[in-house]
Image (cartoon, rainbow, N blue to C red):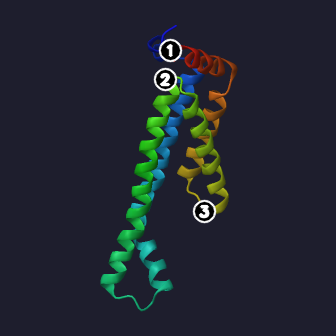
Amino acid sequence: MTTETLRENPPSTIIAAFFGFLVSTVSAIAGGLLVLGARDEIAATLRRANPALTPEQLDRLTLLAQAVPVAIAVVVALVYLWLSFKLKAGRNWARVTLTVFTLLQAASLLATEPSWAGYLSCGVAVVATVLSYLSPSSRYFARARRAG
């Protein structure tokens, strides 16, 4: 069996995991974009923490507080997309990496105050991770390893 055949015929568990990670990525981006709608709340929090800020300083800090999470969400989304396609292609290292990322994502739910998008993203990623370890998936990765 060639690597090309593996790319064309992954089992349904891998296809479901692939789409699960795509959904997780989209919901993570949605969570990152929620911060764009929270400008007033961010500015108020910054003002309470730093009452001596000038209006210009407050505007710059608010913009930074919005831009950083959005930039992080975009970078994470691009990495997740790349890993999802590698998972679908039968790369076991992508499965392991996505598993580690999912565990980190779950841990972050405990350390932060996540939005509904954060819970959704993590839940879908957990399901996708489990699917990627079911028997048909493991056989697929073994065939890909032998073919590669």
Of residue 27 and residue 148, the one placed in the foreground of this image is 148
Q: Earlier in the sequence, mark 3 or mark 2?
A: 2
Label 1 sits on what residue type? Leu
- At a point 47% along the width and 11% down the height, the residue shown is 5
Quarter of the image where one finds residue 124: top right
- Tag shown at residue 113: 3
Label 1 CA crowd tier, 10 Å (few <14, some 14–19, many 20+) = some
**Residue 129 to residue 119: above or below:** above
Q: Earlier in the sequence, mark 1 or mark 3?
A: 1
**Residue 135 to residue 44: above or below:** above
Q: Is residue 103 left or right of residue 7?
A: right
Q: Is residue 14 left or right of residue 33?
A: right
**Residue 120 to residue 148: above or below:** below
Q: Are marks 1 and 3 in contact (CB under 8 Å)?
A: no
List the single residue furthest toward the left: 56
Residue assigned mark 1: 6
Residue assigned mark 2: 89
